[in-house]
Image: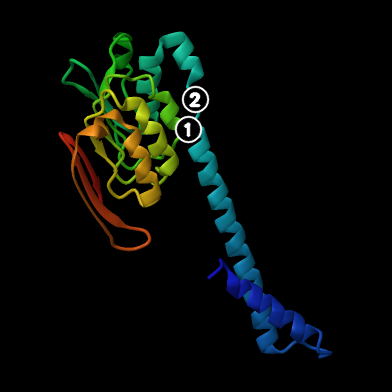
Amino acid sequence: MKRCSAHTCAAVAVRRALSSGAATPSVFTRFLLKLSHYFYDVENILDWNDWLRSQAVIRKNRLFGYAQTNFGKNIAAAYYILTLRGSFRFAGQSEWFRPDSRGRFSYDFMSTPDAQIEEVDLSGTLINHNGLENLVKQNKLQTLSLRGCPEVDDWLLARLHVFGESLVELDLSHCSRITVGGLAALQNLRSFSALQNLRSSLVSYAYMHMCIIWSNLIFVFR
């Protein structure tokens, strides 16, 4: 059903009633007119909300070119992750860098500009295929969690081949925009040559459960 179809129906009914020649609109006609205005306002609010969200996705996934030029690719990638309210760990370190509940974070990660990122947790964030460009130079990335990311889609999967030499664990659970066709792009990862077992079952149009085990590379879709 299309959004606010009730608004369209009410508007048609009002136009018919007003064109019938009645001098004074009936109570029912006035009710339909008010209902039409209500749904029109709701539609505008929903459209405005969608626009604001799309702008937020664009803003959060812009390329951090200035940071890359002035602070290096590693610092720029770390900053991008933290601005998305994600977390990460540098290779050779045990400490995880993550923002607090209000999105604020420490800039201590800038003290090691040569350290590359080994683990990233972006679960529930707005990362998309454009934002992934901020991470593509992290050639030591071994673990990437994109669990429950609403903007993760087949385009992003097609770009993951850049981590083919290092990635050993990927979590794509609860990413409902991924399709079976998008999964085919994962074959571009060189690690996939060690395919041992594949199980899949389509539950609905929006959800699927798939477990792919490539040596120690595990993908889970729920």
Secondary element at image label 1 = loop
Pointer 1 with pointer 2, Cβ within 8 A: yes
The Cα–Cα distance between marks 1 and 2, rounded to whole angstroms, is 8 Å
Decide if residue 59 is in sight here: yes
Q: In this figure, which residue is indicated by the disc labeled 2? A: 63
- Give the quadrant of residue 219: top left
Residue type for callout 1: Asn
Q: Nearer the viewer, residue 21 or 185?
A: 185
Q: In this figure, which residue is indicated by the disc labeled 1? A: 130
Q: Nearer the viewer, residue 113 or 205?
A: 205
Q: Nearer the viewer, residue 36 or 116?
A: 116
218 horizontally vs 64: left or right: left
Mark 1 crowd level (few <14, some 14–19, many ≥20, 10 Å Cα): some
Secondary element at image label 2 = loop
- Give the quadrant of residue 161: top left
Q: Earlier in the sequence, mark 1 or mark 2?
A: 2
Note whether 75 is above or below 178 in the view shown.
Answer: above
Q: Nearer the viewer, residue 120 or 204?
A: 204
Q: Residue at x 38, y 19 (%)?
A: 137
- Give the quadrant of residue 94: top left
Mark 2 crowd level (few <14, some 14–19, many ≥20, 10 Å Cα): some
